[in-house]
Amino acid sequence: MENKLRKALWLLFSLILPLLIFILWYTVSRNKLVSSLVLPSPGTVADEFWNQLTAGTLKTDIAVSVKRILSGYSLAATAGIILGVVMGMSRAAEKFFTLTFTSIRQIPMMAWIPLLIIWFGIGEESKVAVIFMAAYFPVLMNTLSGIRRTDPKLIEVGKMYKLSRIKLFIKIYLPSALPNIFVGLKLGLGISWMAVVGAEMIAASSGIGFRLNDARSLMQFPIVFSGMIAIAVTGVIMDQILTFISKAATPWEKNRH
């Protein structure tokens, strides 16, 4: 009972800042301190959000963007985890890849978009490539970090029992690295969500990013705000799903805390 009360209090505490932001927004729009063309009122945005939702436009746009996310993110997560494990368990592999990957990581994500469009066109392939590039390195680097942080004493014990490389990974490296891997997965998911919206705003004819850019060009700012809210809500839902999976896969971390 005490634990539930503590969680409820923390939830209320976390709602203070969003509530303050909403009050500020309402106050500014009600007193017309900023033009309604630039900052629509909460009521106007809520009405537009509901209209977009009931018309199916919002659901369709989000579904298109999420489908792109699932394609690129699943590829990035798979490749990032595999190579992160290989680099973490092999000094030679780490030395071989580190310089190149470190150089590529310095290039901003948005700088890749024109080149990826040249290579893959403005179809789905370029969007998937953007998502892959956005999610790959956070997953890779956090997986590598998790493998490298494995207790050397545990590794020595595994070698004493003459465990094969695969069994050594499954029994010792993986349980140690899982929390870091999930941190990378969450970071990669958040960055890829931002990346796909950015890519859709630059070159797309569908998706929530396209809808935002189209509404901006027509100065339909209530649609822009409702789209931004939909992006935030969808991002939080995806993050919470991954958090739930993380907690289920690493129960020992809960006990540790």
Image (tube, rainbow, N blue to C red):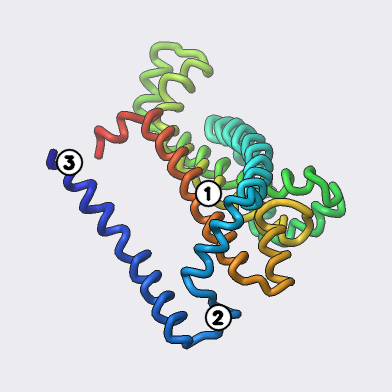
Give the mark toward the camera: 1 or 2: 2
Mark 1, residue position: 234
Give the alpha-carbon distance from disc 3 to disc 1, as whole Å.
28 Å
Label 3 SS: helix
Residue type of the residue flagged with mark 2:
Ser
Residue 24, quarter of the rendered image = bottom left
Label 1 SS: helix
- In terms of sequence position, does the residue under pointer 1 or pointer 2 come before the other? 2
Q: In this view, does 212 lie to the left or right of 243?
A: right
Residue type of the residue flagged with mark 3:
Asn
Residue 79, quarter of the rendered image = top right
Label 2 SS: loop
Q: Which residue shows up at 34% across the image and 70% down it?
A: 20
Give the alpha-carbon distance from disc 2 to disc 3, as whole Å.
44 Å
Mark 2, residue position: 36
Give the alpha-carbon distance from disc 1 to disc 2, as whole Å.
26 Å
